[in-house]
Image (cartoon, rainbow, N blue to C red):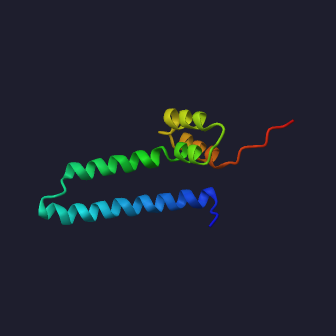
Amino acid sequence: MNLSPVTRSGIALVSLSGIVAQAQAASRSAHAKGAFSDQDFFIIVVLGIALVYFLPAILAFLLGRRNAVAILALNLLLGWTLLGWVGALVWALIKDSEPSE
């Protein structure tokens, strides 16, 4: 099945929210057993946040964009602002233009 990059990123975000919800449920049930600590949950949440934060750069590398390193730099330096993160995401999802001859 050929999915558009926007659909893929939406699926990734939905999957991430499902993973966090499962981690929370596992934390509650396993915490009663003493097998899953709050520190484990914290690590999962931090990794989830990092995944969402670097989503534009990850997509750029996965989609093979020519400017993937520049997108990573924009994401790293200005991703903390909503405008920088959205700009990096849009840049990662726009198809590379064909080189002019």
- Above/below status of 73 relative to 7: above
Q: Is residue 12 left or right of residue 32?
A: right
Q: Is residue 8 left or right of residue 52?
A: right
User: Residue sitting at 12 percent across and 63 percent down?
Assistant: 33
User: Residue sitting at 38 percent across and 50 percent down?
Assistant: 48
Q: Position of residue 61 (x, y in %)?
A: 57, 43
Q: Position of residue 43 (x, y in %)?
A: 29, 47
Q: Position of residue 45 (x, y in %)?
A: 33, 51
User: Residue sitting at 41 percent across and 60 percent down?
Assistant: 17
- Above/below status of 100 relative to 86: above
Q: Quadrant of residue 69?
A: top right
User: Residue sitting at 49 percent across and 58 percent down?
Assistant: 12
Extreme residue toward the front, this view? 1
Quarter holding the C terminus is: top right
Q: Quadrant of residue 50?
A: top left
Q: Is residue 59 left or right of residue 95?
A: left
Q: Position of residue 9 (x, y in %)?
A: 55, 56
Quarter holding the N terminus is: bottom right
Q: Quadrant of residue 7?
A: bottom right
- Above/below status of 73 relative to 2: above
Please state the total of marks drawn on the protein image: 0
